Amino acid sequence: MIFLPFPSVFHKNEFKHVTLSVMCFCLSVFMFHFHKSQKMNSELNFKKESVFYKWQIRSYKIYLEEESKTQFQKKLQEHLHQVKDGTLYNLSFKDEDFMSSVLRYAKKGDPIQFGIWNKGFQKYLEYEKNSVAHRWGLKSSSGGVQYLSYALIHSTWIHLIFNLFFFFLFSSLIEQKLGSLMCFASLLVGALTAAFFYQFISGLSHIPLVGLSGVVCTQSLLVALVLGREKIRHFYWLLPSQDYQGFVSLPVLYFVFLWVISDLSGLLSTPTGWGGVAYAAHLGGFIGGFFLWIFYLLLSKSLYKETI
């Protein structure tokens, strides 16, 4: 099933300066580092049978048994026998405390296997050093600029294409109806509220938060609230038959409402620290969209008073 807003803005030739500039920048950054990151990822694609893979899991288990501090770590340690090795392997790279002291735990055991693991770990550190996501994405060791720059970085082609599609859709509507300044404001507000809400609810980790999805959520709610009951075209696809696909005119608020419910249920059903979708960042983006709408109403009221 597919249900997407598809407004007539796509058919207009008005140049949208902020929207297209941001899209070009995101695409340029991704393309510039794509081949390099692909090469690094292939070199770090350790198999489950490799010493690095097994030693990383072993070291993380030792860490959890000796140093569990957070509530998540304590729960993970209690149910350690039920957690799959692949999950532990991925979680070990997210755990900032573990990654900052991993050598201490990895050294416990066979020095030959530690040496093999350490060789692979040095490759990983080199990858982090050269990775755009780790330098400009939002992680637990990030500074101030990463609270904005993370939104312009994407991890995969699918991630990039989906985010840019929805960004173009909603950002174009904002720039056309509310102006370029409001469009730029939605970018800043969306990035900041998504980042802070994600940090507050889910917490930052060693794996960086990246992507425009929080900004898109801000823009989608702003568009839905500003347009109100104004109807725009939506494309729907239920089955590969003409009777079950086409266009229908509906308020965009319906689509955004379903999106909010989907992200809220995703957040509530996913334990903290698990999962690859930043539901908290999406919900933070929606909150940013609500406050930006309030600001827009106040600004409109102020400008109206000045004209009379």
Image (spheres, helix red, strand yellow):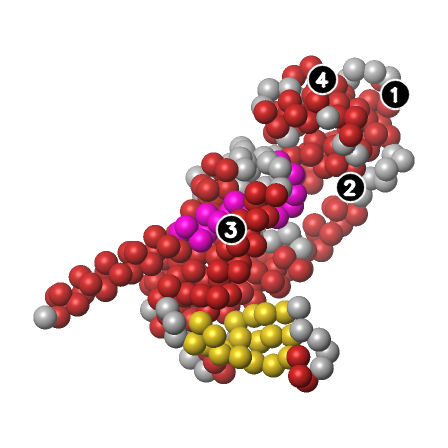
Residue 127: x percent and y percent?
69, 40
Task: Find out whether the residues at labels 1 and 2 contact each other: C-beta distance under 8 Å.
Answer: no
Residue 225: x percent and y percent?
37, 63
Q: Earlier in the sequence, mark 3 or mark 2?
A: 2
Residue 244: x percent and y percent?
66, 79
Which residue is tagged 3? 282
Which residue is tagged 4? 65
Task: Find out whether the residues at labels 3 and 2 contact each other: C-beta distance under 8 Å.
Answer: no
Q: Is residue 44 visible?
A: yes
Q: Quadrant of the C terminus?
A: bottom left
Residue 227: x percent and y percent?
37, 70
- Between label 1 and label 4, give the one nearer the viewer: 4
Instruction: Point out which mark residue 44 bears.
Output: 2
Residue at 79 percent of width and 26 percent of height: 81
Residue at 38 percent of width and 72 percent of height: 229
Q: Earlier in the sequence, mark 4 or mark 3?
A: 4
- Range covered by the magenta-colored residues: 273-288
Q: How many marks?
A: 4
Examine the rendered structure and indicate whether residue 17 appears above or below residue 197: below
